Amino acid sequence: MTIHIPKIILVSILVLAFLLPNFGSFAQTASQEEKAVLEKELKELEEKIGQYERDITKTQKEKQTLQNQIYILKNNIKKLDLQIYQSDLMVRDLGFQIKDTGDSIEKTSLEIENLKQKLANILRLIYEEDQKSLIEILLSEPKLSDFFDNLMALETLNSKNQELLENIKGLKLNLEEQKQFLGEEKEDTERMAKIQLLQKQESETVKRDQEYFLKLTEAQYQQYLKEKQETERKAAEIRARIFELIGVPKAPTFGEALDIAKYVERITGVRPAFLLAILQQESAIGKNVGQCYLVDSASGEGVRVNTGQTMFRTMHPTRDVPPFLRITIELGRNPYKTLISCPMSFGWGGAMGPAQFIPSTWMLYKNRLQSILGRPADPWNIQDAFVASGLYLSDYGAKTKTRDGEWRAAMIYFSGSTTNSAFYWYANNVLKIADGFERDIAAIEKSR
């Protein structure tokens, strides 16, 4: 018996049978061989960097001679060169991930559009069949059995229609997840660019030190050490040292910054030396990134203050512009004449003040800050920025005052997690800076 079903129904049913999408892993378009070579090179670099660090540590424990000092500086330069190259490789690796995720997003989007078109065709067919009256359908079929076969076919089509809707829904969820991954990968690339900036800055400093020591004799170096030790005992000089901060009209002295950090310690439990190290590192990033003004609140476009250059992605238009406008208006500031950080190669700018908070994160602490300060908090106010940083670091483990707790807090402050080894340099460097500040603070306390 031949079932007299309209051809379009038969075709639709056959198509639907093969519509189940693949929800497997994201497409891997980058060369697996190239990625494997990259990972191998990164592992070898890690081993070489570790060897330099061991050599430096060993030499530091030996007698303080000019030869040993120059050896330490040379190894530091070689280590930093490797770390900068390592950062380059990590940026390339992130580039592969961004391309893979971008290709996957494009593929998923095309699949969604394809299924939506098929769904539209099926819905149109079902609608047309629904418009026919029972008498019209009966008269159009040569046999009564054909009529019932058509009804069953339509019921099957309706069932497949629901299945298709669920598949589209699943693909859309998958697409949103991929877009989130893409955003995170771009933010990781932005963070790596910041780390590279700090590494290059440190490398230049070490090279200048090396040039200085290469000009000295052993006797001159020993005299230098004696003078250095004497200088470190002068607490007044330490207190008078300028503590550089980004986004403030007048930087405090180290002593003034320390007094604020001690006040924050009483509120949050965060060690002053650690808080100061975080703020110094963030200000070093902010200073080198540059300062911008927001120009267009709809697009997030801005302008670099010192050059007038137009800067796209100065502030995220949906995530950060609305809270930024609210923050500045509440404080009586002109949002279009208030300094924020400029964007780097990836991601968005828009970080505010000495602590370099983005507006959406600042809003998470707004009520707590007002409760502590008794007034609306100002991200560009030194004390307010210190308190905000202390609260954030305390929330993520720094109040334990253990090296592990502070390291974890520094990682989260910079990247939002503790798992990405590409950002270990940031946390390690914060602890190194904190060690130096701790010695300065001890010298100040000893003089009292």
Image (cartoon, rainbow, N blue to C red):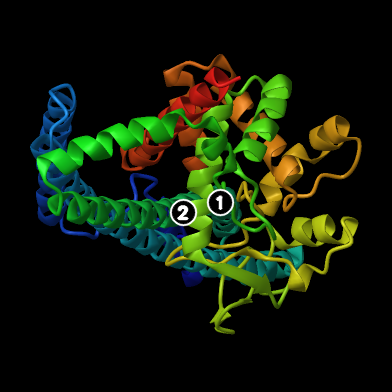
Residue 211 on image: x %, y %: 18, 56
Q: Quadrant of the C terminus?
A: top right
Q: Is residue 316 left or right of residue 187?
A: right
Q: Nearer the viewer, residue 404 or 53?
A: 53
Crowding at dot 2, Cα within 10 Å, few <14 / some 14-19 / many 20+, comes out as: some
Name the residue: 66% across, 23% down.
265
Q: Secondary structure at mark 2?
A: helix
Q: Vertical placement of 209 versus 314: above or below?
A: above
The amino acid type of the residue labelled 2 equals Glu
Q: How many marks?
A: 2
Distance between the Cα atoms at labels 1 and 2? 26 Å
Residue 98 on image: x %, y %: 35, 58
- Which disc, if any, is residue 180? none
Choose the circle earlier in sequence order: 1 or 2: 2
Name the residue: 71% across, 35% down.
387
Whether residue 361 can be seen here: yes
User: Mark 2 = which residue?
Assistant: 187
The amino acid type of the residue labelled 1 equals Glu
Q: Nearer the viewer, residue 50 or 386?
A: 386
Q: Nearer the viewer, residue 15 or 369?
A: 369
Q: Is residue 393 left or right of residue 331?
A: left
Whether residue 139 can be seen here: no
Name the residue: 63% across, 76% down.
301
User: Mark 1 = which residue?
Assistant: 244
Q: Is residue 245 left or right of residue 224?
A: right
Q: Quadrant of the N terminus?
A: bottom left
Residue 380 on image: x %, y %: 72, 53
Kindly indicate the quadrant of the structure image that contains residue 57.
Answer: top left
